[in-house]
Amino acid sequence: MNENVFEARNDLERKLEALHDGEMSEADFLIALIKAEIFMPIQDNTTSGIQLSTSAKPLVVEDESGIPVMLLFTSPERAKAVVREFPGYGGGLLTEFKWVLEKMDEGVGVSLNPVLEIGYDIEPATVKKLQASLQSS
């Protein structure tokens, strides 16, 4: 397989490709994303195999304007190249994006599949709207 060419490996990736190809609207993609399973890298917090914390610390970076952005991926395999750059983030959770939205702080954006050809960024204002939509449903 050519690593430079993105090949969809799951339903969310097929929807992401459809979005990039103009075959799916952003609104429809976001509805699908809320229901989709994503991979969230979390900081390893163990000693000798014993978990030291009951809370997961997700991988959050600041963008060029200082806004915190949570890095999420369509699968654990897609995260490998990025998490190598962040020592201590070898673990992760496969979970619904809806759960992540429910736990996120205000003012944080999302980057899905950062540095990959097929990715998607969500501004903090849009994250807030998605969170509000969950509360009203």
Image: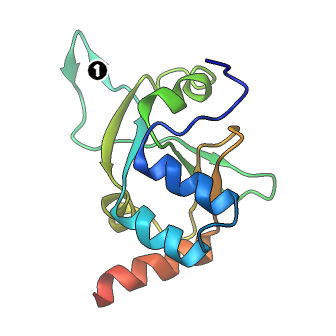
Residue 122 vertical placement versus 53 (above, below) = below
Residue 23 at x, y percent in the picture:
63, 66
Q: In the figure, residue 48 lies in which quadrant?
A: top left
Residue 121 at x, y percent in the picture:
65, 59
* Residue 43 horizontal side relative to residue 113, left or right: left
Residue that numbered label 1 is attached to: 46
Report the residue at 55% width, 27% height from top.
83
> Mark 1: which secondary structure?
strand
Residue in the foreground of this view, choosing between 34 and 135: 34
* Residue 136 horizontal side relative to residue 57, left or right: left
Residue 115 at x, y percent in the picture:
70, 38
Residue 25 visible? The answer is yes
Report the residue at 68% width, 49% height from top.
62
Report the residue at 28% width, 87% height from top.
137
Q: In the figure, residue 136 lies in which quadrant?
A: bottom left
Pick the quarter of the image with the N terminus.
top right
Report the residue at 65% width, 35% height from top.
6
Residue 32 vertical placement versus 69 (above, below) = below
